[in-house]
Image (spheres, coloured by chain):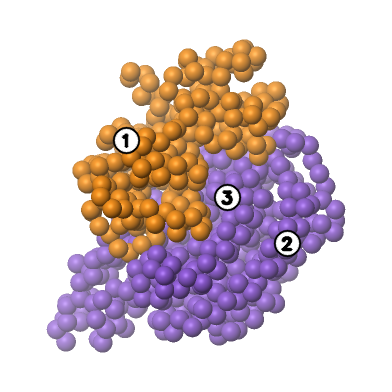
Chain colours: A purple, B orange
Amino acid sequence: MSKEVNVDVEYLTRVEGHGNIVVNAKDGKIEKCEWQVVEAPRFFESMVVGRSWKELHHITSRICGICSIGHSLTSLKATEEAMGIEISQQDEMLRKLALHGENMQSHILHVGYLALPDLAGVGSVIPLASSHPDELKTVIGLHRLANDMSKLLCGRTTHPQRLIPGGFSKLPTIEELETLKGRLADSVEDLKAVASFVKGLASRFPDFERETEFFSLGHDKEYPLYDGKLKSSDTGTALVEDYLSMTNEYIVPQSTAKYTKNNREAYMVGALARLNNNYDNLSPMAKEVAESFGLEPVCHNPYMNNVAQIVEVVHNVEDSIRLIDLVLDMGLEEQSPYHQPDIDVRAGRGIGAIEVPRGILFHDYTYDDDGICTEANAIIPTNQNHGNIQYDMESLVPQMLADKTEKEIELALEMLVRAYDPCISCSTHYVDVKFV
Amino acid sequence: MSGKPKAAFFDLAGCEGDQLQIANLEEKVLDLINIVEVVSFREIMKEHSDDYDIAFIEGSVTNDHLAERLEEIRENASIVVGLGSCATIGGINSIRNSQDHEEVKHRVYGDQADLFPSWDKAKAIEDVIKVDYHVHGCPIDRDEFIHVVESLVLGKDPEIPNYPVCVECKLNENICAFERDEFCVGPVTRAGCDSCCVNEGTICWGCRGLIDNPNDDAHSDVLEEYGLSAEEVMKKFNLYFGWQQEARKDE
């Protein structure tokens, strides 16, 4: 075979942040196959040093525009653990609602606006406005609902305000929660319509599998997003405080983002990892949708992360309705305007771990007696997927070399990276496919 | 510009939260693409063209590579608009401008810090190229973005407030943060956000940057009532003003 394949996609599109895919093959032999992350570093772990405990969630929310609620909450959990701050059961339920809102927003954006164009054979969501107007309006409606929900809980859709150490600066009213509940219940039919639309196109996801390790939170009783222990499909459960021994960051020269590994050369985080590790705790309707796609644990096809995201949105909606009912049944406890919880500022270290849309996120802070941050570490979901993307590429390209065209290989690789829904600016900034 | 102006979106060092606000326009995105032709927007579309009239740029400039990209964009575009604090004022990225750069790098990347070239300061895009208009905020306000686009399409200058957040905050009848024993930079920060953060029970953090002449145009009633000067306010709480403060020193 004398085939030469050169793929060179600079600044991969329809992903958040910048990265490159470089592949070149000659005479059927792969000479280079690399996932490169070339985003300009932003140094958040240094920027927070010297700043007050009151500012850290505000600063670190800016790590990512799309998952700013998740970064805020992880930051708050770290600060609260460091200072021994307890939050009320009500505040915990409202935070879980905020996280559901963000997960819905992020997943709908990814599946509906970024991944769907590949399945429909177009370059962006814009042509869908004329080819599939009804389906697109349904997607937009769901996206708006998710954003309205985030705004109601957090004060803003992006870079939240109401989430503060110890609780909330402002709460939604009973009427607002009731209205939200009604809108969530009404959205179920729309969600099923989107799921069925995607199902009709799902045969375009490449039939590719590579066994890997899945890493997420794990929980006995609930589908863990806000709370849980660490869970690896290879090595079982571990305490959050032992996260460093599960993530093992290392630096590679082709990436400004740090890579991670645990039991194998790489592991996967995100919706598919969560679903594989915690399938039994999905809501009933979410399981039905998973079954309709034939998605069951353990699924080793990374492209199915798109489907896992749809399943999770159904779970988010169903669990949100349950949480709102709980809050309302307990009777919403009101608080004074411009609420500031009493905080006993003290020195200490705290680690927050939360499942955000793209996977498990860690913030780890150390404070001095005055509540000034002296050391910080953050491990971002997308960074934990970079290694797995690299190994997927190394496994996928040889399978395609014999009978696929350069264009087909390029599309499959782009779709592979997009399936992970990478958020590269979280760490740094870049995706390019280069078949040099 | 004849016909629909061509628009392109770019991102440097930032969180992409400002471009997200464009997706967050929901149905209004369809109106937007009726008045401008989007020819490049890496975050949402595969197509790309260097033939555009208006360039919208998010993110700060932090190394030579980004500066070169920025200069190319300036050459291609007739109008350049900064999107969001990182682009318009350096934003959160400029927190590190007052820190020791060797320490900053070392803390994150250890002895491999030199693998990743970065300037010792994060800069606003107008530090590198001429910028025609700014849409401030972290993130940008969606209505203000639409106002700017509509103005540009009509060939008008957009109206961006040059008065402090306190003005909007008073209209919204908030209890002043200083009254609540909080510290707030609303008296020196450019309005246009409808005091959204104070409305949600917190403070103004300064994300829209300083008003043009903080010493003259700060909200004097609030400063007098709490015995503060504009300089004291800027000095005491500086999350977003790092690059602007240095630029003021140079003047």
The C terminus of chain A, quarter of image? bottom left
A396 and B214: which is toward the camera:
B214
A260 shown above or below A407: above
Q: CA distance from mark 3 to mark 2?
A: 18 Å
Q: Three-letter amino acid code at disc 3?
A: Thr
Q: Secondary structure at mark 1?
A: loop
Where is residue B137? Give x, y as percent. Answer: 48, 38
Q: Is residue A353 left or right of residue A181?
A: left
Are the residues under marks 3 and 2 on the same chain?
Answer: yes
Left/right of residue B144 with respect to residue B183 in the rendered view? left
Judged left or right of residue A19, residue A377 is right
Mark number for residue A431?
none
> Which amino acid type is shown beneath numbered disc 1?
Asp
To which residue does mark 3 refer? A157
Helix or strand or loop: what does disc 2 sit on?
helix
* Foreground tag (1 vs 2): 1
Marker count (numbered): 3
Residue drawn at point x = 66 percent, y = 43 percent: A162
